[in-house]
Image: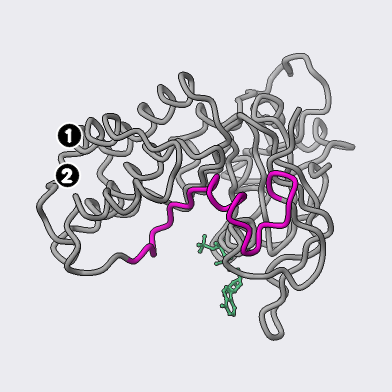
Amino acid sequence: MTEVVKVVRLNKQYEDHNAIQDITFSINENKIYGLLGRNGAGKTTLMKMITAQIFPTSGELLVFGEEPYENEKVLNQICFVKESQKYPDNFTVRDILEVSKSFFPNWDEEYAHSLVEDFNLPLKKKNRGLSRGMHSALGIVIGLASRAPLTIFDEPYLGLDAVSRELFYNRLMEDYTEHPRTVILSTHLIDEVSNLLEHILVIDKGQLIIDEDAENLRGKAYTVTGQTSKVEAFIIGKEVIHREPFGGLLSATVINNGNSSVHVPGLEVSPVSLQQLIVHLTKGKSENRGVMAK
Ligand SMILES: Nc1ncnc2c1ncn2[C@@H]1O[C@H](COP(=O)(O)OP(=O)(O)OP(=O)(O)O)[C@@H](O)[C@H]1O
């Protein structure tokens, strides 16, 4: 398996704040990665280092086997779509697409125009007149049409309505199937993208706490609900990541260390979505920090 990104003991310090702390992981070719975590966890900082926009404080970072800084060969293969992307105010959508075309060697003009139609983007409208959703849609069009071997979307959906977000997920999946490439998607809408993601990286307070195939994570935890005394007895010796009492009942979410489905007489057992799992693992003080990172 070819490594597209290799990160070893990476650190980024902003003045007195350790935004990324001693992170090690690899990103392999032709997979869709979810880079997840709470606000301020360090996701954008990590993406900015991968795309050579900022330097690490220490550690090793290789992209396509080389250091990315001022490395045109590497940077030509990356498309980074971020909400804060700035274009000149008086550029039209058409101008912005023309400029993008010159940046990305794999750019597909016909595909770009079909996406413009899908997202109802007004080609003649100037950048300053675009709505927030249109601005996001333009980023998505560029990210998809670039067909960059490493395409990174950092919260690309701000202002996009549910229909357009669905369109983005569908187009991404279709195009990725026809033209496999490595995609990193950073988002807070985990449930919406959970079926797209093949591998999950979760950053919490600058540390990598999950580095695991999405398939493995889907059955990683379950919730048992029932009489408090019964639930308390059941969870003894188990790794509990969330407890929620209500009335005389208790709901407890535990890590599933076995493979088989769990049946407990007298208790209701329900699956835990990827979003719930990540919420439980990253809220407040987590005794489970580090348990799932390799
Ligand atoms: N230029 C900077 N100078 C100082 N601190 C910074 C700078 N950029 C980011 N930080 C801090 O580093 C931490 C990580 O920020 P980062 O933007 O990487 O988080 P994030 O996971 O992308 O968050 P969000 O989901 O809110 O976008 C935060 O505490 C942030 O305040």
Who is closer to the viewer here, 34 or 143?
A: 143
Residue 95 at x, y = what percent?
A: 21, 54
Which corner quadrant holds the C terminus?
Answer: top right
Taking the image as four quarters, which one is ligand 1 found in? bottom right
Residue 233 at x, y = what percent?
A: 82, 33
Q: Which residues are magenta?
A: 63-86
Q: Residue at x 19, y 50 (%)?
A: 94
| Colouring style | one colour
Q: Is residue 139 above or below residue 177?
A: below
Quick check: 252 left or right of 59?
A: left
Q: Is residue 194 above or below residue 282?
A: above
Q: Residue at x 38, y 62 (%)?
A: 85
- Of all residues, the one furthest to the right in this rendering is 237
Q: Dot 1 lies on which element?
A: helix
Residue 252 at x, y = what percent?
A: 68, 39
> Residue tagged by mark 2?
121
Quick check: 1 left or right of 169?
A: right
Who is closer to the viewer here, 204 or 201?
A: 201
> Residue tagged by mark 1?
117
Contact between marks 2 and 1 (CB within 8 A): the answer is yes
Q: Is residue 43 magenta?
A: no
Give the amino acid at mark 1: Glu
